[in-house]
Image (spheres, helix red, strand yellow):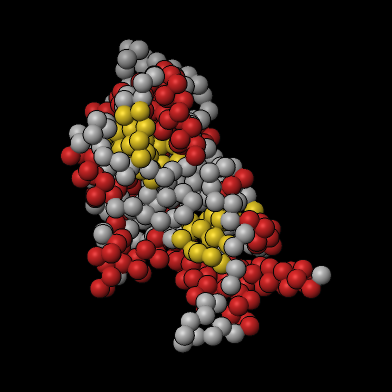
Amino acid sequence: MVEIKNPLYDSVAVSTQSIHADAHLRVTADISAPISVTTTFDYAKDSVDGYNYGPDQRYTYSRDTTPVVAKTEAALSTLTEGFAVLYGSGLSAALAVLIEHRPKKIALGKCYFGIRNVIQQYQQLVGCVQVVGIDCAFDGVDLVWIESPINPSGEVLDLCGYALRAHAAGALLVVDATLAPPPLSYPFRQGADIVVHSATKYLGGHCDLLAGVVVTKSAASVASLHQTRSTLGLGAGSLESWLLLRSLRTLSLRVVQQSRTAARLVALLESHRRAACATACHHPSAAELSLGRRIAAIHHASLQFSSCSGAAQSTCGFDVAKQHPNGFGAVFSVRFASKTQALFVARHLKLHRFATSLGGVESLVDWRHGWDASADPTLLRVSVGLESYDDLANDWKQALLALDTSEAAAAKL
């Protein structure tokens, strides 16, 4: 069968890859790729093993793969600089990595609670699997799993540093790059061995599909991943695959703009927080206190970059901008002085939908403690969409002022 990944598109821009990287698999005259709703396909006329879809493609049963899945994997492979395998969700993609490599000792960093649940399920099925933190020694570790940027803070880790540590111990490095898809980050360039994405988020980008992706550096491992996917029924459906392919066409346009808007919002909120802090040289005005005094902290990779630039870069330990050449991601977190304040702001933002998930074209704000008991109850996770920066900034201003007014009124009672 024809190679899924077309090297002709490796050297073109990301926006061009998004649109044309699957063109070599086109058989019909459709401009938009057709959706394969069939579960089974006619055999070739001359042989059951012959090509039955164009001159060099063969499909038999949709649990194995379909034309639209192949196209989506082709586009993802080129975009991620590896070899992509598509799954029904990010968590099934994570499970596939564990089944494929069968680790006995996992070093696990801060991550989405669903990944912790998948690893716990793997421990129950396999037994005798040890999990340690990424700050522990990697003695005996055979798989290091990190998330960068981290959910929910939006902060990033030194991928080169963890790659060096993992490889020195003989371990594989898995990077969950869900919060910074191409062109924001390329973890293979920093030494990752495997990259995973919840394609439900930025790759899908419209809050209308569930999918996951495993990307490897070797084409040889794809056949094994495909076999396990088919055996366990972990594949993505035809509609979800088509929706994902449609979304990839605008990937660069979406995530770069979302990342820029997020960085501006982070800078604005951080300026409000700082302006509300009294120092020997600054006495906050009433207006400054109204906007910023209840913001305890802001977390985002852009603030890591600011604190690590210039003479202070040695305190950071790695080049944040080099690791994220086209933006720091569109997820950040805000901590307030109390849980009540956090929930008040979440409910009074008008352009940010109060809902879970992230990566869609609409801005979302989520109280993570409601899903994950280990999350800080004073923290809100913000996923920035494609709305105007000015409108989102004004939305935050009115919510913060509403909080100030509410607490001032309560204090008078």
Does 145 sit above or below residue 225? below
In the displayed orientation, state which residue is furthest to the right.
Answer: 413
In the image, what residue occupies the spot 51% across and 68% down? Answer: 265
- Looking at the image, which is closer to me, 38 or 375? 375
Does 230 sit above or below residue 105? above
- Looking at the image, which is closer to me, 220 or 347? 347
Quarter of the view holding residue 301: bottom left
In the image, what residue occupies the spot 32% across and 15% down? Answer: 49
In the displayed orientation, state which residue is furthest to the front.
Answer: 280
Residue 15 pos. (x, y %): 37, 55
Residue 388 pos. (x, y %): 55, 68
* Count of all numbered marks drawn on residues in the image: 0
- Looking at the image, which is closer to me, 162 or 388? 162
Could you tell me if residue 198 is visible in this image?
Answer: yes
Q: Quadrant of the C terminus?
A: bottom right
Residue 83 pos. (x, y %): 30, 37
In the displayed orientation, state which residue is furthest to the left.
Answer: 168
In the image, what residue occupies the spot 31% across and 17% down? Answer: 50
Residue 309 pos. (x, y %): 29, 70
- Looking at the image, which is closer to me, 302 or 220? 302
In the image, what residue occupies the spot 45% across and 66% down? Answer: 263
Asked whether, in this view, residue 72 is left or right of residue 105, the answer is: right
Q: Quadrant of the N terminus?
A: top left
Could you tell me if residue 261 is visible in this image?
Answer: no
